[in-house]
Image (tube, rainbow, N blue to C red):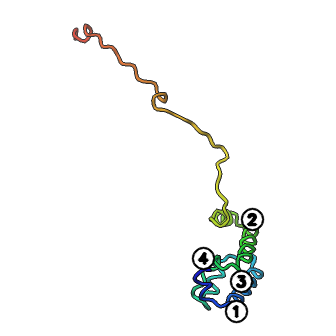
């Protein structure tokens, strides 16, 4: 049980669950941060971290995340925004390099050593 769950009565948690369900149902792009900012006017303790700690809300939070991810994947007119948001830790998408080349170079083999010139002592003394 987390700190917020201790502060909220079962009736308040039920109201929070109903409000979250309504929010997710009414929004094409439901994000938990948006819900918290709307709901915080009634209870300043509502944050995404607290919501994830309430066991009764976990199925709704997963549904909201899945709906948000589906919305972002379907974005055709704003792909850069969708890609940026999908790279956030809650979704787990990452950049991958398609042409990854590994090269192992050691300095002893990287460049040929310059050859030392032999200086002819007779040629230099003639000058």
Residue 73 tag number: 2
Give whichever of 49, 124 is nearer the camera: 49
Residue name at image x 59 percent, y 88 percent:
7
Circle 3 residue: 20
In the picture, measured across the screen, residue 79 lies left or right of residue 117, that is right
Q: What element carries label 2?
A: helix
Q: Is residue 50 above or below residue 14?
A: above
- Marker count (numbered): 4
Eye-nearest disc, 4 or 1: 1
Q: Are marks 3 and 4 in contact (CB under 8 Å)?
A: no
Per the model, the C-alpha gap separating discs 3 and 1 is 14 Å
Residue 33: x and y in percent read: 63, 77
Q: What element carries label 1?
A: helix
Task: Find residue 75 and report its image quarter.
Answer: bottom right
Residue 92: x and y in percent read: 66, 61
| Farthest-out residue, front | 1
**Mark 4: few/some/many CA within 10 Å (<14, 14-19, 20+):** few
Circle 4 residue: 49
Residue 8: x and y in percent read: 63, 89
Per the model, the C-alpha gap separating discs 2 and 3 is 22 Å
Give whichever of 78, 98 is nearer the camera: 98
Eye-nearest disc, 2 or 1: 1
Q: Is residue 43 above or below residue 25?
A: below
């Amino acid at each position: 049980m987390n700190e917020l769950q201790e502060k909220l009565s079962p009736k308040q948690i039920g109201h929070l669950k109903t409000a979250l369900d309504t929010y997710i149902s009414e929004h094409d792009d439901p994000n938990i941060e948006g819900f918290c900012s709307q709901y915080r006017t009634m209870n300043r303790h509502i944050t995404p971290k607290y919501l994830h700690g309430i066991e009764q809300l976990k199925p709704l939070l997963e549904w909201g995340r899945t709906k948000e991810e589906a919305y972002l994947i379907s974005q055709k007119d704003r792909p850069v925004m969708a890609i940026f948001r999908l790279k956030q830790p809650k979704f787990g998408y990452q950049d991958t390099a398609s042409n990854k080349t590994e090269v192992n170079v050691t300095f002893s083999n990287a460049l040929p050593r310059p050859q030392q010139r032999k200086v002819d002592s007779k040629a230099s003394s003639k000058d």
